[in-house]
Image (cartoon, rainbow, N blue to C red):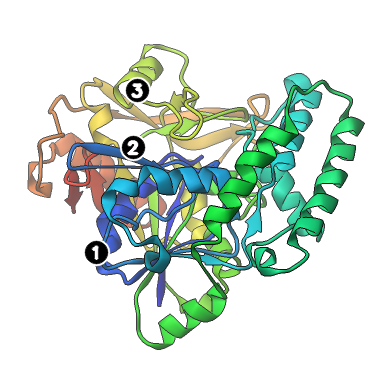
Amino acid sequence: MIDLLLGLQWGDEGKGKIVDVLTKNYDIIARFQGGPNAGHTLIFDGNKHVLHTIPSGIFHERAINIVGNGVVIDPVIFKNEIDNLSGYNIDFKTKLLISRKAHIILPTHRLLDAASEKMKGKSKIGSTLKGIGPTYMDKTGRNGLRIGDLEMKDWKERYQNLTRKHLNMISFYGVELDFDLEELEKDFFTAIDALKELTFIDSEEYINQALAKGQSILAEGAQGSLLDIDFGTYPFVTSSNTTAAGACTGLGVAPNKIGDVFGIFKAYTTRVGSGPFPTELFDEDGKTMAKVGHEFGATTGRPRRCGWLDLIALKYAVQINGVTQLMMMKGDVLSGFEVLKACTSYHYKGKDIFHFPYNIEGENVKVNYTEFEGWKEDLTQMTDAGELPKNLKDYIAFIEDFVGVKVHIVSVGPDRKQTIMV
């Protein structure tokens, strides 16, 4: 069976840390969607690492790491990631495998992204400007270039044809962009040459053969369920399926091969970029969460918007993913709050509802809260569930009862050692 690990909010839940913690239990870690708009932060042995495309199991000697067909790859960023890991004696040729069906982000994809956002003005969706959306558009429009194309004799011709098309599209947008394509292409083709030194595989065959041999696999998601292209807060979403179904299409595995679904959520809620956020705080509580939680995007550096835990949204994410185990992150950030709040219903178009509706914009949704007593204890040095304060345990028990799934891990700090099994 293949287990899944997913974010249940708007991303930035701490998935990278938990993949790193769990990797010792798996033979293969496989990333199934998204691109370098993701930022998975791992902290251990006093060092901080931010991975964007490489799976979070790369530091473990046992695990094979696969970049699946559902991922889009920026060769320049990918090369930089590998270069940054050069001091760790990792055999990338054997430990990092790339699906031939994964799509390639071209320099002009990033330019298209910038032109599209600039044209939208105040209506922009908050893109990371990494070229993710335009690359997925080419994928669904059947124009894209894939890793397997690098092995074709006419690769350069295919590249040039698509680049010309992109330049025409940029000129159609009618916005001014300052760029030097020749310089961008120089870095791009240097990175392509480095990419060709790695191992390309027919990943769906590789993964299914591994399952047939009884090998254990953990599928690693990026972003979060509320950013899913179908089930997220559209149009303020990412361009891929971040939910459990995306693992099937992003790796080529059948639904009946899915085992556990690990759902990661913060003890509160954050969001980067634009889009509705019913429990967002604009007061001192929100500022405290941001400061104590170091809430800045791992990829973009943008400050994250902070708010109380939204249990309506969390229950929705649990439902659409079929979550079997919950993992709560950043419980330590809430230490010191006199009172905690959690959203337990929405007042939607004149009545209280208990499900996640089509539109959660502020003019449609007001939040109804349940309050909890806070705790003052410092959680960061705790190592056993028995040490956790009673009020935190009560908070967790309420969450479990509300969404119908048990919490199995509580994170009390960013280091891999600051992880409590409950």
Residue highlighted by disc 2: 267
Q: Where is residue 244 in the image (x, y as percent from the top left)?
A: 52, 62
Give the Cα separation between the discs numbered 1 and 3. Answer: 32 Å
What amino acid type should be assigned to the residue bearing mark 2?
A: Ala
Q: Of the two numbered discs 2 and 1 on the same chain, state the one appearing first in sequence.
A: 1
Q: Looking at the rendering, in which quadrant would you find the C terminus?
A: bottom left
Residue denoted by label 3: 289
Which residue is at a point 24% across and 64% down the rendered structure image?
Answer: 24
Query: How many labels, in total?
Result: 3
Amino acid under label 3?
Met
Circle 1: residue type: Lys
Q: Position of residue 156 (x, y in %)?
A: 76, 56
| Marks 1 & 3, CB-CB < 8 Å contact | no
Q: Mark 1 and mark 2 in contact (Cβ < 8 Å)?
A: no
Q: Residue at x 42, y 73 (%)?
A: 2
Dot placed on the residue nearer the N-terminal end, 1 or 3? 1
* Label 1 vs label 3, nearer the camera: 1
Quadrant location of the N terminus in the rendered image: bottom left
Tell me residue 304's x, y (percent): 47, 26
Circle 3 Cα neighbour tier, 10 Å, few/some/many (<14 / 14–19 / ≥20): many
Front residue of 413 and 85: 85
Q: Nearer the viewer, residue 364 or 148?
A: 148
399 and 223: which one is in front? 223
In the displayed structure image, the side of residue 330 where residue 120 appears, left or right: right
SS type, badge 3:
helix
